[in-house]
Image: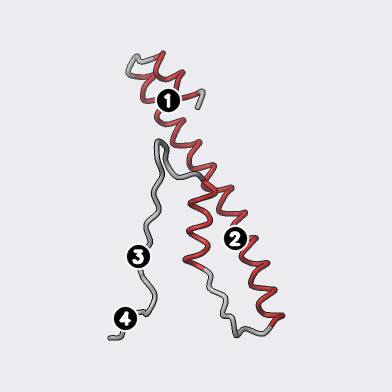
Amino acid sequence: MELPKTPIVKVMTTSGRGATVDEIADRCVKNMIHIADSAHPEVSRQAREFEKQILAMLKVYLTQAAAGERTTIYNVLLNAGQHELAEMIRKL
């Protein structure tokens, strides 16, 4: 088995925060879609348009997932009687 010439693991770090929806979506698209430098210009153009559409769609779904997770955390805290903490989460 031949190993890839380029690194197969990439590390991204943040300081004092988690990764944003934009950062995660960008990383995802870069790992999903590869456009060869040797691709025909029209194929390359279409692939870049497809890449933009996938990026936009990922951002929508990742934003919805983050909001859904916050709603779940809010409800768990509320049900545990942690009303003040639940409100802090809701305001994020």
Measured Cα–Cα span from mark 4 to mark 1: 45 Å
For the residues labelled 3 and 4, say whether their Cβ atoms are less than 8 Å apart.
no
Q: Which mark is residue 3?
A: 4
Q: Secondary structure at mark 4?
A: loop
Q: Residue at x 27, y 86 (%)?
A: 1
For the residues labelled 1 and 2, say whether their Cβ atoms are less than 8 Å apart.
no
Which of disc 1 and disc 4 is earlier in sequence? 4
Q: Look at label 3 and name its amino acid.
A: Val
Which of disc 4 and disc 3 is earlier in sequence? 4
In this figure, which colouring scheme has been used for the structure? Answer: secondary structure
User: How busy is the neighbourhood of tag 2: few (under 14 within 10 Å), some, or many (20 plus)?
Assistant: some
Left or right, 4 with reference to 70: left
**Residue farthest to the left, as pictured:** 1
Q: Look at label 2 and name its amino acid.
A: Ile
User: How busy is the neighbourhood of tag 3: few (under 14 within 10 Å), some, or many (20 plus)?
Assistant: few
Measured Cα–Cα span from mark 1 to mark 2: 30 Å
Left or right, 92 with reference to 10: right
Q: Residue at x 49, y 44 (%)?
A: 20
Which of disc 3 and disc 1 is earlier in sequence? 3
Which of disc 4 and disc 2 is earlier in sequence? 4
Residue 24 is situated, as x and y percent measured from the top left of the image, at 48, 52
User: How busy is the neighbourhood of tag 4: few (under 14 within 10 Å), some, or many (20 plus)?
Assistant: few
Quadrant of res 82: top left
Q: Look at label 4 and name its amino acid.
A: Leu
Please name the residue that numbered disc 1 is placed on: 74
Quadrant of res 19: top left
Q: Residue at x 46, y 30 (%)?
A: 71
**Residue farthest to the front, as pictured:** 15
Q: Which mark is residue 9?
A: 3
Residue 56 is situated, as x and y percent measured from the top left of the image, at 62, 54
Measured Cα–Cα span from mark 3 to mark 4: 12 Å
Q: Which mark is residue 54?
A: 2
